[in-house]
Amino acid sequence: MDSNEIKMYIREMSETLAKADNPDLIEEFLPCLLTENELQEVASRWALVKMIDQGIPQRKISTDLGLSLCKITRGSKELKKTESPFKRMIDLSLGD
């Protein structure tokens, strides 16, 4: 698949998830789409950006989640970007 196809399918899936308006359906869908390892990876990345957003030190996050500092630093950089999608999604999850 080329990058345009990837973008097209990600866009289509994003639009479909947004229409679902049903967390239970999405929770059932994700394990159908992703392997157990992929689910763990996605969940740990979500956990790490939430922890960074809460001000938890990177070394503690690394210890608690078993992630490399490199991965945590990447998440931290993404959160610091202007109009960060990570930050906007965290705010959505908190109802802000």
Image (spheres, rainbow, N blue to C red):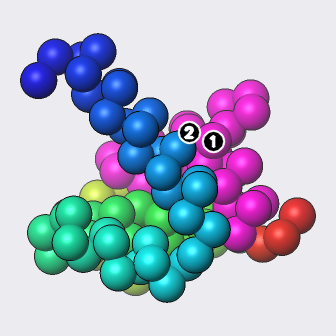
Quick one: quadrant of the C terminus?
bottom right
Q: Residue 2 carries which label?
A: none
Residue at figure coordinates x 13%, y 69% from the top left? 35
The local secondary structure at tag 2 comes to: helix
Alpha carbon distance from label 2 to label 1: 8 Å
Quarter of the view holding residue 6? top left
| Furthest residue toward right | 96
Q: What stretch is highlighted in magenta?
A: 70-93
Judged by its main secondary structure, the magenta piece is helix
Res. 73 in view? no
Q: Where is residue 87 in the image (x, y as percent from the top left)?
A: 69, 50
Q: Where is residue 89 in the image (x, y as percent from the top left)?
A: 66, 55
Q: Nearer the viewer, residue 17 or 46?
A: 17
Comes first in the chain, label 2 or label 1: 2
Q: Mark 1 points at which residue?
A: 85
Is residue 86 shown in magenta?
A: yes
The amino acid type found where label 1 is placed reads Pro
The amino acid type found where label 2 is placed reads Glu
In the image, residue 15 above or below residue 8: below
Is residue 75 shown in magenta?
A: yes
Q: Position of residue 53 (x, y in %)?
A: 68, 61
Mark 2 or 1: in front is 1
Q: Are marks 2 and 1 in contact (CB under 8 Å)?
A: yes
Q: Nearer the viewer, residue 25 or 53?
A: 25
Res. 31 in view? yes
Residue at figure coordinates x 67%, y 31% from the top left? 81
Quarter of the view holding residue 22? bottom right
The local secondary structure at tag 1 comes to: helix
Q: Name the residue under label 2.
A: 78
